[in-house]
Amino acid sequence: MKPEDRDDAFLWDILDAARETRGLMEGFTLKKLLADARTRRALERTLEVLGEAASREESRPTNERNERWPKPIGLSVITP
């Protein structure tokens, strides 16, 4: 697989995990989330997937000045 194809796959994983995370959080307050262990664990997992994919993506330029994405430090390592 060519590097740019891998980047596309990682970007897809990032987008998919972000959408899933947003869907999980819909209608939740912090208080409700803290009381719902199942949703909290699912949210943690989607953030792990997002962080893992983001750490493997080759930081494509994001604007006309050729600036790169910042690396997501520790997003895929969640501790209680």
Image (cartoon, rainbow, N blue to C red):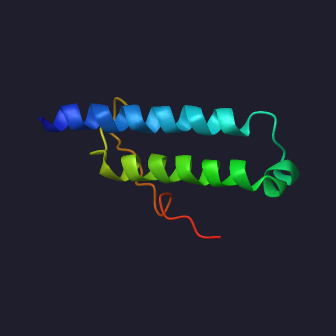
Residue 36, how many percent across, how many down? 79, 52
For the view shown, which residue lies furthest in the right direction? 31
Residue found 74% across the figure and 56% down from its top: 37
Residues 66 and 74: in front is 74
- In the image, taking residue 58 as reference, residue 21 lies left or right, namely right
Residues 49 and 3: in front is 49
User: In the image, is residue 21 above or below residue 39?
Assistant: above
Residue found 31% across the figure and 45% down from its top: 57
In terms of image quadrants, where is residue 8?
Answer: top left
Residue found 80% across the figure and 57% down from its top: 34
Image quadrant containing the N terminus: top left
- In the image, taking residue 66 as reference, residue 5 lies left or right, namely left
- In the image, taking residue 34 as reference, residue 15 lies left or right, namely left
For the view shown, which residue lies furthest in the left direction? 2
Residues 59 and 66: in front is 59
Residue 62 visible:
no
The total number of labels drawn is 0
Residue 38, how many percent across, how many down? 70, 51
Residue 26, how many percent across, how many down? 75, 33
